[in-house]
Amino acid sequence: MPFQVSCLPLGIEEFSNNPFEVYPNPVNNILFINNIQGYNIQKIKIVDSNGRILLEKKGDVSEINMQNFQNEYIY
């Protein structure tokens, strides 16, 4: 079963255009992250709908294997 993905810059109103492409949505196996504007990514967190951190990766990540996660909504 696929995952539903949400990519929002939380609490920052000046982002009118999303600086990242996150696809596919829904995710079956691999989540791809395209850093369109070349920001210095320090950390990416995958969080479930209960706020639990499922995965935390440091550095510039362009893809994440999602096969090991249970079928649920992640953010």
Image (spheres, rainbow, N blue to C red):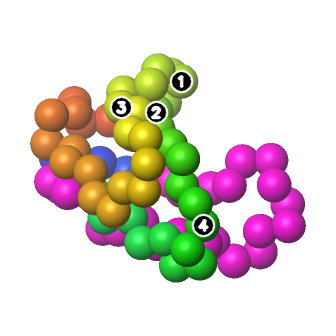
Residue type at numbered disc 2? Val
Residue type at numbered disc 1? Gly
Question: Of tags 3 and 2, which is closer to the observer?
Answer: 3
Question: Of tags 3 and 4, which is closer to the observer?
Answer: 4
Residue type at numbered disc 3? Leu
The residue where tag 1 is placed is 51
For mark 3, does the 10 Å Cα neighbourhood hold few (<14), some (14 to 19), or many (20 or more) residues? few
The local secondary structure at tag 1 comes to loop
Sequence-wise first label, 3 or 4: 4
Would you place residue 39 above or below residue 63 in this image?
below
The local secondary structure at tag 3 comes to strand
Separation of marks 1 and 2 at Cα, in angstroms: 6 Å
Residue type at numbered disc 4? Tyr
Query: Left or right: where does residue 73 sit relative to residue 51?
Result: left
Q: Tell me where residue 66 appears, x and y as whole percent.
A: 21, 45
The magenta span reads 6-30
Question: Of tags 1 and 3, which is closer to the observer?
Answer: 3
Using the image, tell me which numbered label, if any, was put on residue 47. 2
The local secondary structure at tag 2 comes to strand
